[in-house]
Image (tube, grey):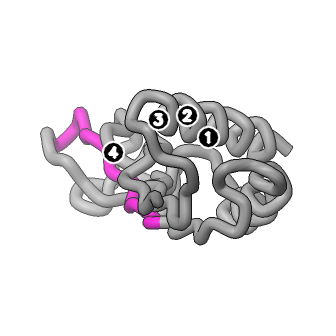
Amino acid sequence: MHEMAICESLLDSLRDAARHHGFARVTRVRVSVGQFAGVEVEALRFGFDVVMRGSIAEDAELVVLEEPGSAWCFDCSTTVSLPDRLALCPHCGGGRLRPNGGTDLRIKDLEVV
């Protein structure tokens, strides 16, 4: 499950931010997860709770903002929302699509003390 590795990387980022900004504890983490990021949200929540134990973010709330997926259609020159990565263009039915949104996982903001 690569979500555990994502959570470990997230903890590294939190520790770096704490050193840089001088806070001692994280109480809330908001992350944006794109529909096409390949992240299972429930596995991310589980991994977050496990990885954050004993750290500056122990018992922190994880808020996941799910971002929709979108792609550029080469056939009709339109950016479209897609229900999944393999969907055809909902405007023209074309299959030549390049994802251009919903592919990232990002820390949006933190609440700290």
Residue 33 is situated, as x and y percent measured from the top left of the image, at 49, 54
Residue 89 is situated, as x and y percent measured from the top left of the image, at 33, 53
Q: Amino acid at mark 3?
A: Ala
In the rendered image, which residue does mark 1 sit on?
10
Name the residue: 13% across, 39% down.
77
Marks 3 and 1 in Cβ contact (< 8 Å): no
- Is 97 on the left or on the right of 28, as rendered? left
Q: Secondary structure at mark 2?
A: helix
Q: Amino acid at mark 2?
A: Ser
Q: What stretch of residues is rendered in magenta?
A: 65-76
Name the residue: 51% across, 57% down.
84
Q: Earlier in the sequence, mark 2 or mark 4?
A: 2
Q: Amino acid at mark 1?
A: Leu
Look at the picture and state if 79 lies above or below 41: above
Q: Please tell me the numbered disc located at residue 101.
A: 4
Quarter of the rendering occupied by the N terminus: top right
Calculate the distance from the C-alpha at mark 2 to the C-alpha at mark 4: 23 Å
Marks 3 and 2 in Cβ contact (< 8 Å): yes
Marks 2 and 1 in Cβ contact (< 8 Å): yes
Disc 4 crowd rating (10 Å Cα; few below 14, some 14-19, many 20+) is: many
In the rendered image, which residue does mark 3 sit on?
17
Q: Earlier in the sequence, mark 4 or mark 1?
A: 1
Name the mark nearer the viewer: 2 or 4: 2
